[in-house]
Amino acid sequence: MRRYGRHTDEDDIRSRPSRRGNRPRTHIRPKHEDAAEGMVLTVDRGRLTCLVEDRVVVAMKARELGRKAAVVGDRVALVGDLSGKKDTLARIVRIEERRTVLRRTADDDDPYERVVVANADQLAIVTALADPEPRPRLIDRCLVAAFDGGLDPLLVMTKSDLAPAGKLLELYGDLDIPYVVTNREELESGEAADRVREHLEGRVTAFVGHSGVGKTTLVNALVPEDRRRTTGQVNAVTGRGRHTTTSALALPLAGAEGWVIDTPGVRSFGLAHVDPSRVIQAFPDLEPGTEGCPRACSHDEPDCALDAWVEEGHADPARLYSLRRLLSTRERTEGD
C-alpha cells in the first residue's frame, strides 16, 4: 500500500475519473420566467397532454422536478416546442400551487396517497339507484375526500326509473348537498345533461363513481363531441360494472363555460390520509363547538365538546350525527 507524506504532491495522486463526467453540480435551478402556462388534460405513460392557450400540446416532465408528479387539472409552466404539431414534445418545468386536491389511497391501511385531480371546484358523485345497487359507504367516503380536499360535493343519482330516490335523499338530507335525480329516458333525451349542466357552469367538476352507474354516459352527454369511450355493462353475477374509463381526462363543458373531468370507475376509496379536523370545516355550524374539544379529538368520544354544543341549541343533532357517520366511515369498508 502506498503511503503519502504531509507534503503530498497532487500530481503524484492517481484519481479515478467519474463515469458521469466532471461537470460541477449546482442546486440553482433556472426560473424559466418565459415559460407558457397550461393546464394538464390527461396523463398517459409519462406523456402529459396540456392545453396552452388554444393549442393541445404533448409534454414530458423535466428531470429537475424530481418525483413531483403533475396530475389532471394541474396548472403548469411549459417550455420547448409549444406549437402542438404532430411528433413535437414540450417540457413541464414547474407545477403551480394547487387550490384544491382530491386524494385517495388504495385502502385505509395504505400510507401512500394518490392525487386523483387537482384544482377542481366540485366533486360530482354519481350513483345508480339500482342496477347496481347504491353503496352509501362509498358515497360517504367520496364526501369525506371532497370535504378534506376543499371541493364542493354534488350528488347525481341515475336510473330513478328502476328505484325511487327518497331513501337515499333522506340519508343525505341533513348535509345540505345539492343533488340531481335522473332516469334513462331523460339521459337519452338530453334533459338529464341539461339539469346537471346547471350545476357545472363556470366550474371545474370532477366526476367519480363506481362502474356501471352511468358516469361516463353522462359525461358523454355533457361533452357530445368527445364520446371517446363506450358505455360499460353491469355484470349480472357480481352486480359490478366494467371499467370504461382508464385514465382521468379533462374536457370542456359543451354549451357553457366550465370543465368536466372524467375519472376511472372506483371500487374502493381509501381515506388513510384524511385529517378529521379538515372534514369538520365543511360543517360551519359545528366547527365553533370544537374549541372545547381535547387535543386530537376524533369528535366521536366521551369528552367531545360537540355534544354540549348541540345540547345548547347551536346546531341540529342530525348534523352531528351526519358528521360522525362520515368520520366513522374511515374505519369501515365500503361494503359494510
Image (cartoon, rainbow, N blue to C red):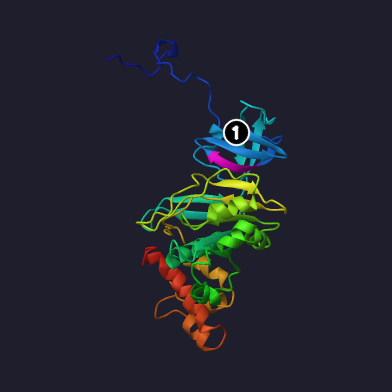
Name the quadrant of the C terminus: bottom left
Query: Label 1 belongs to which residue?
Result: 59
- Residue 192, image x and y in percent? 62, 61
- State the residue lying farthest toward the top: 12
Residue 100 shows up from this direction: no
Relative depth, front residue between 112 and 240? 240
- Left or right side of 317 for 51: right
- Above/below status of 227 relative to 167: above
Span highlighted in magenta in the image? 39-43
- Whether residue 113 is in magenta: the answer is no
Q: Residue at x 52, y 42 (%)?
A: 68
Q: Residue at x 54, y 40 (%)?
A: 43
- Residue 274, image x and y in percent? 46, 61
Majority SS type along the magenta span: strand
- Left or right side of 14 for 181: right
Q: Secondary structure at mark 1?
A: strand
Relative depth, front residue between 304 and 200? 200
- State the residue lying farthest toward the left: 1
Relative depth, front residue between 166 and 20? 166
- Residue 211, image x and y in percent? 46, 54
**Which amino acid type is shown beneath numbered disc 1?**
Ala
Name the quadrant of the N terminus: top left
Q: Please identify the quarter of the rendering in which residue 303 is found.
A: bottom left
